[in-house]
């Protein structure tokens, strides 16, 4: 039922295989992004009885944030302050090639 709903909402996932048997292979990352996007749109923020808001399900349980600090080179450190930024994400990119043996290594290279 879920797969049929996905194929109805996103016809690219209903493409047939070239040989005519079954469905064509699709990109898992693209499918995941579409699923999370729909969940985020449809599982809304709730307002509690005391007026506070509970974050949406996806934002609460399926997202994260990365804090980055850009520091100036040592010779300019006295004149310039480090710049810190926070960026929200719904998926972590992981670089994969023949030299990557561990998830940690792929995340560092992404």
Image: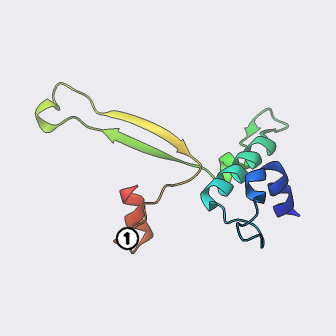
Image quarter in which the C terminus is found: bottom left
Image quarter in which the N terminus is found: bottom right
Callout 1: few (<14), some (14-19), or many (20+) C-alpha neighbours within 10 Å? some
Q: Residue furthest front?
A: 19
Which residue is at the front of the view, 17 or 42?
Answer: 17
From the viewer's perspective, is 21 left or right of 88?
A: right
Q: Residue furthest top?
A: 79
From the viewer's perspective, is 5 left or right of 15?
A: right
Which residue is at the front of the view, 32 or 17?
Answer: 17
Residue annotated with mark 1? 100
Which residue is at the front of the view, 49 or 100?
Answer: 100
Against 108, residue 57 (above or below) is above
Numbered disc total: 1
Locate residue 50, reporting x and y percent: 81, 35
Which residue is at 75% across, 35% downward?
52
Locate residue 83, reporting x and y percent: 33, 32
Locate residue 11, reporting x and y percent: 78, 51
Which residue is at 81% across, 44% downward?
42
From the viewer's perspective, is 83 left or right of 73?
A: right
Which residue is at the front of the view, 59 or 107?
Answer: 107
Query: Residue 98 sits in which quadrant?
Result: bottom left
Kind of element beneath mark 1: loop
Q: Residue furthest right?
A: 1
Locate residue 25, reporting x and y percent: 67, 66
Query: Residue 49 sits in which quadrant?
Result: top right
Which residue is at 80% across, 56% downward?
6
Which residue is at 76% across, 49% downward?
39
């Amino acid at each position: 039922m879920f797969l049929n709903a996905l194929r109805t909402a996103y016809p690219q996932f209903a493409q047939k295989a070239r040989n005519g048997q079954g469905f064509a292979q699709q990109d898992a990352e693209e499918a995941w992004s579409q699923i999370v996007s729909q969940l985020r749109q449809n599982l809304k923020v709730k307002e509690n009885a005391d007026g506070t808001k509970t974050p949406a399900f996806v934002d609460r349980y399926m997202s994260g944030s990365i804090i980055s600090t850009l520091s100036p080179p040592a010779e300019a450190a006295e004149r310039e302050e480090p710049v810190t930024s926070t960026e929200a994400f719904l998926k972590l990119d992981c670089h994969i090639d023949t030299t990557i043996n561990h998830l940690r290594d792929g995340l560092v290279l992404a």
